[in-house]
Image (spheres, rainbow, N blue to C red):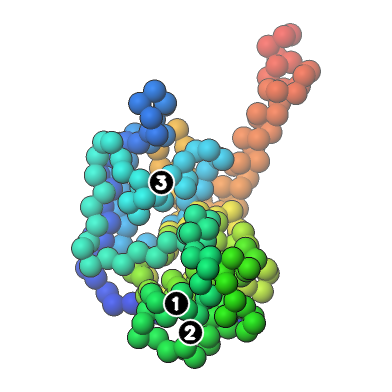
Amino acid sequence: VTFTFQSVDLINPPIIQVRDVSFRYKENLPWLFKNLSFGLDMSSRVCIVGPNGSGKSTLLKLITSDLTAPEGMVIRNPRLRLGVYNQHFVDKLPMEEDPVTYLRRLFNEETYQTCRNLLGKFGLEGHAHTIPIRDLSGGQKARVVFAELSLMAPHILFLDEPTNNLDIESIDALCIAMREYTGGVILVSHDARLIETTNCQLWVVEDQNVTPWTEGFDHYREHLLKKLEEQLSVIIPGGGEREKKSS
């Protein structure tokens, strides 16, 4: 298994600018984000982390235009090619087509054998190249999407939990590919190997904001454990803060 992503042509920064973006799903719901402003370019290596429900995947969708913010704007270089991996994209694969036919329809300059070779590199077994995508497992469908991303040669890859359907060998291959990839990488992941291998800066989604975490992944993990212990001390009867309040 050898994951590879093509070298990409350089485009001048800024590639993506997020300016004063605020977002909520409905007017009667609380804001997920307020007044976000940041930039991304081809040298960006970012892993978005935070509690469940804090808005990590929503942030990716705002940056990639899958969602539109009611306030603020997201400006993109018109030459920008985005590569996006998430479960939604896997589920949207054309279930009646086989993987080779699908790739050749999208990239008609690629030969039948080139597509088969690429699918094989991404770990899709030979017999699965020419059967309907609906008959593939979740992990096999994920490999089809990764092969598609490779042929796209995107300037920035947005990967939302990319290791969920991959075995250990494939995760290692993805780590190597991300390290060698010349474009930007924006991750949502809790896989320590992937985060550390890609040399990502952590961006913490919390309290309607996105804040760079400068201390590294191990320190962030310790921070989460400490917060969890504090929360448990409150909710467990007879412990921690509750015990202090009752005394």
**Observer-nearest residue: 191 or 85?**
85
Q: Residue at x 61, y 41 (%)?
A: 224
Q: Disc 1 marks which residue? A: 103
Q: Residue at x 27, y 65 (%)?
A: 80
- Dot 3 alpha-carbon crowd within 10 angstroms: few under 14, some 14 to 19, many 20 or more: many
What's the amino acid at mark 2? Cys
Q: Quadrant of residue 183?
A: bottom left
Label 3 or label 1, whichever lies nearer to me, is: 1
Crowding near pointer 2: few (<14 within 10 Å), some, many (20+)? Answer: many
Between circles 3 and 2, the one closer to the viewer is 2
How far is the residue under mark 2 from the one under mark 1?
A: 7 Å
Circles 3 and 1 in contact, beta carbons < 8 Å: no
At x 41%, y 51%, the residue is 60
Which comes sooner in the sequence, label 2 or label 1? Answer: 1
Q: Is residue 229 visible?
A: yes
- Is 138 placed left or right of 246 in the picture? left
Percent from the top left, x then y, of residue 152? 38, 74
- Which residue position holds label 3? 59
Tag 2 and tag 1, C-beta contact below 8 Å: yes
Spot occupied by residue 25 in the image (x, y as percentages of width and height): 40, 34
Task: Say which label, 3 or 1, has the lower sequence index.
Answer: 3
Q: Amino acid at mark 1?
A: Leu
> Residue furthest toward the front?
96
- Callout 1 crowding tier (Cα within 10 Å): few <14, some 14–19, many ≥20: many
CA gap, disc 3 to disc 2?
32 Å
Residue assigned mark 2: 115
* Spot occupied by residue 64 in the image (x, y as percentages of width and height): 35, 54
At x 31% / y 62%, what residue is drawn?
41
Image position of 38 (left or right of 227):
left
Q: CA distance from mark 3 to mark 1?
A: 28 Å
- Mark 3–mark 2 CB contact (< 8 Å): no
